[in-house]
Amino acid sequence: MDYLLKTEPAVYSFADLEREKTTIWDGVTNPAAVKHLRGMKPGERLVIYHTGDEKSAVGTASVVAVDASDPRNPQVKIKVGKPIAKARTLAEIKMRASFAESPLVRQGRLSVVPLTAAQHGWLVGE
C-alpha cells in the first residue's frame, strides 16, 4: 500500500527530510492515522504533503522500518525520496475523480492517508 503523510512545513518540511535523509514519523494521535502507521511495511511508498498555506503534495519518501511495540505511538522510520517536479495542490486533487472517496478530501484532519497505486502515480507525476 502507498500512503500520504501530512506535515506542517513550519514544523517539519520536506526540505528538513531532504537534509536529514531519514526521520522517525511519530507523534500521531488520531486513531485511524495510528492504525495506518502500525500497518506500514518497509519499502512502501510515501508522499509528503504540506498542510497550512501550501496544501500540496511536495515530495516522496519510503518506509524503512516500523516499530509498533507501543500500539498507541508506532514509530515509522522513513527515508527521503525526491521532490515532486510539479507539486499537486489540494484544489487539483479535489478535481480528480480518483480522489472523490479518498480520506484526503473526505477527512481533512487525517494526517496519514492510504493511497491507491493510481493516486500515488498521479501525485508524483508517474
Image (cartoon, rainbow, N blue to C red):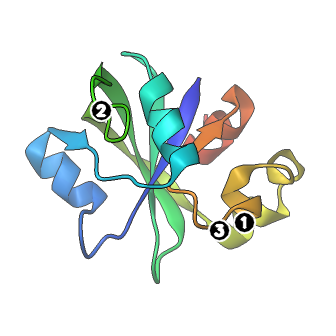
Secondary element at image label 2: strand
Residue 13 percent coordinates (x, y): 27, 62
Between discs 1 and 2, the one toward the N terminus: 2
Left or right of 50: which side holds 97? right
| Residue 3 image offset from top left, x and y in percent | 54, 37
Query: Which residue type does callout 2 highlight?
Result: Val
Q: Does residue 82 appear left or right of residue 15 in this picture?
A: right
Q: Amino acid at mark 1?
A: Glu
Observer able to see residue 68: yes
Separation of marks 2 and 3 at Cα, in angstroms? 25 Å
Disc 1 is placed on an element classified as helix
Extreme top residue here? 42
Label 3 Cα neighbours within 10 Å, binned few <14 / some 14-19 / many ≥20: some
Left or right relative to 30: residue 27:
left
| Rendered residue at 20%/40% (across/down) | 24
Query: Of the numbered discs in the image, which one, if any, rests on residue 4?
Result: none
Q: Mark 1 touching mark 3, by CB under 8 A?
A: yes
Residue 125 seen in this snapshot:
no
Q: Quadrant of the C terminus?
A: top right
Q: Is residue 16 above or below residue 102?
A: below
Residue type pointed to by label 3: Leu
Q: Residue at x 28, y 31 (%)?
A: 70
Decide: is 97 above or below 75.
Answer: below
Instruction: Locate residue 110: give its quadrant.
Output: bottom right
What label does residue 76 carry, if any? 2
Residue that numbered label 1 is attached to: 92
Residue appearing at x 26%, y 34% in the figure: 75
State which tag comes first along the sequence, 2 or 3. 2
As helix, strand or loop, the secondary structure at mark 3 comes to helix
Instruction: Find the distance from the CA under tag 1 to the CA under tag 2.
Output: 29 Å
Taking the view exactly as shown, the residue that stands out farthest to the bottom is 53
Q: Which residue is mark 3?
A: 90
